[in-house]
Amino acid sequence: MEHSFFSLLEAYRHLWNNRSLTTKKLNEQESQSLLYEMIEKELRDEMTHPRVRQLPEIKFYYAINRIMNSDLSGQEKLSLIHIHINVMEQIKENSL
C-alpha cells in the first residue's frame, strides 16, 4: 500500500465527514486499527437500528460506490477498496 494508514484514515474521514472518529493524534498502528474497526462497523451496519440493518454485501456495495464517486485520488480509492475487501473477507469467514 502506497499511502500510510494515517492518510487513509483521513481519506475515510473525508468520505464520512459527519462521523466522529477521534480527535486524538494517532500513530500508524492506531490509525490502522481504527480504520479497520470503522470499516467493519460500517459493513456490519452497526450504526443503524437492528431492525433496519442491511446485509454486509449490500453495505459493501454502497461503500465501494461511495469511494468510487468521491474526489479522492485514484490510489486512495484503490487502497480503501482493498481494505474494504479484506474486512469483508474477514466478516464472511467469521460468519461460517
Image: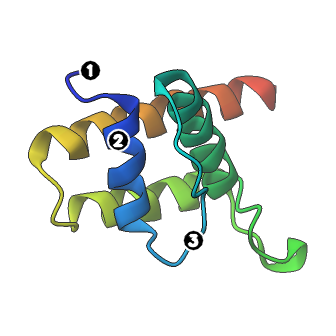
Q: What residue type is labelled 1?
A: Met
Residue at image location 62% in from the left, 52% down from the top: 43
Q: Mark 1 points at which residue?
A: 1
Frontmost residue, 3 versus 60? 3
Measured Cα–Cα span from mark 2 to mark 3: 15 Å
Q: Nearer the viewer, mark 3 or mark 1?
A: 3
Q: Is residue 8 left or right of residue 18?
A: left
Residue at image location 30% in from the left, 58% down from the top: 67
Disc 3 secondary structure class: loop
Q: Earlier in the sequence, mark 3 or mark 1?
A: 1
Q: Mark 2 points at which residue?
A: 8
Q: Earlier in the sequence, mark 1 or mark 2?
A: 1
Q: In which quarter of the image is the N terminus?
A: top left
Q: What residue type is labelled 3?
A: Arg
Q: Where is residue 50 in the image (x, y as percent from the top left)?
A: 88, 71
Residue at image location 15% in from the left, 38% down from the top: 75
Labels 3 and 1 touching (C-beta < 8 A): no
Frontmost residue, 35 versus 70? 35
Disc 2 secondary structure class: helix
Labels 1 and 2 touching (C-beta < 8 A): yes
Query: Residue 19: which numbered mark, if any?
Result: 3
Q: Is residue 27 left or right of residue 10?
A: right
